[in-house]
Image: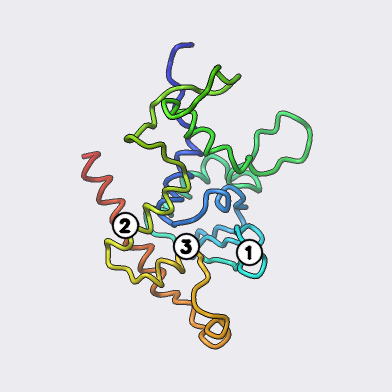
């Protein structure tokens, strides 16, 4: 029992799939409150306060969930839906519970790719194996954002729409004043098509 390989936490597995399928930043996801997920409308709201970047460039983002990402949120809700946070911190102390550390998933992924680390000793209470090594280079949760964007590109999603799905600021300041369409339909279709592609990959490799 003590020699068994500890798998990645289920919540962390779901976080990685959501990051890949929505092009979100892992930190934005880990700060999610359940009030930000609308299961009736199948949307996930990311408030500007949770967005990485300079204050002037930070914007709210409304993610239209594909069947793939919606399913992952539903699975997550069965695990943590009884509380405020989608990814709650463990409440071993009596302090007010909050979200997990924003580096937690990255640490878990890194701990399972130790061949790329230069550790001189085993870290206390940390996993140390190579079960998530996927090639010759270490990968991080942030890389999934790029992978998802590249998959959208392969699906012929226009570059501007991909950037908007990543919540990048595009266009000049004048454009942002006068061109106010948020490309909601185009973004919805892009996330939907990416989700379909991921479901197809799953069905092919799991059948």
Residue at horizontal 51 percent and vertical 85 percent from the top:
179
| Quarter residue 178 falls in | bottom right
| Residue at mark 2 | 151
Residue at horizontal 44 percent and vertical 76 percent from the top:
183
Whole-percent x, y for residue 54 in the image: 64, 63
Task: Left or right? Give the position of 136 relative to 25.
Answer: left
Residue at horizontal 65 percent and vertical 38 percent from the top:
89
Q: Are marks 1 and 3 in contact (CB under 8 Å)?
A: no
Q: Residues within 10 Å of mark 3 (few under 14, many from 20)?
A: many
Task: Left or right? Give the position of 51 relative to 130.
Answer: right
Query: What secondary structure is found at the residue carrying circle 3?
Result: loop
Residue at horizontal 38 percent and vertical 73 percent from the top:
186
Question: Which image quarter is the C terminus in?
Answer: top left
Q: State the CA–CA distance, disc 1 to disc 2.
A: 26 Å
Which tag, 1 or 3, sits closer to the chain's start? 1
Q: State the CA–CA distance, disc 1 to disc 3.
A: 13 Å
The correct choice, above or below, for 33 with respect to 174 in the image is: above
| Residue at mark 1 | 48
Residue 24: give its label: none
Residue 166: give its label: 3
């Amino acid at each position: 029992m003590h020699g068994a390989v500890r798998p990645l936490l289920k919540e962390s597995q779901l976080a990685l799939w959501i990051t890949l399928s929505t092009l979100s930043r892992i930190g934005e996801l880990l700060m999610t409150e359940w009030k930000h997920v609308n299961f009736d409308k199948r949307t996930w709201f990311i408030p500007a306060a949770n967005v990485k970047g300079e204050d002037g460039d930070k914007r709210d983002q409304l993610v239209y969930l594909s069947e793939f990402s919606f399913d992952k949120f539903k699975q997550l809700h069965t695990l943590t839906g009884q509380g405020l946070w989608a990814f709650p911190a463990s409440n071993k102390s009596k302090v007010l519970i909050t979200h997990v550390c924003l580096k937690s998933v990255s640490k878990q992924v890194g701990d399972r790719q130790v061949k790329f680390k230069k550790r001189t000793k085993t870290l206390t209470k940390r996993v140390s194996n190579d079960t998530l090594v996927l090639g010759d280079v270490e990968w991080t949760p942030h890389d999934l954002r790029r992978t998802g964007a590249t998959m959208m590109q392969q699906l012929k999603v226009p570059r501007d729409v991909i950037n908007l799905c990543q919540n990048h600021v595009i266009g000049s300041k004048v454009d942002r004043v006068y061109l106010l369409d948020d490309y909601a339909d185009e973004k919805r279709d892009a996330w939907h098509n990416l989700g379909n592609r991921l479901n197809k990959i799953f069905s092919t490799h799991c059948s």
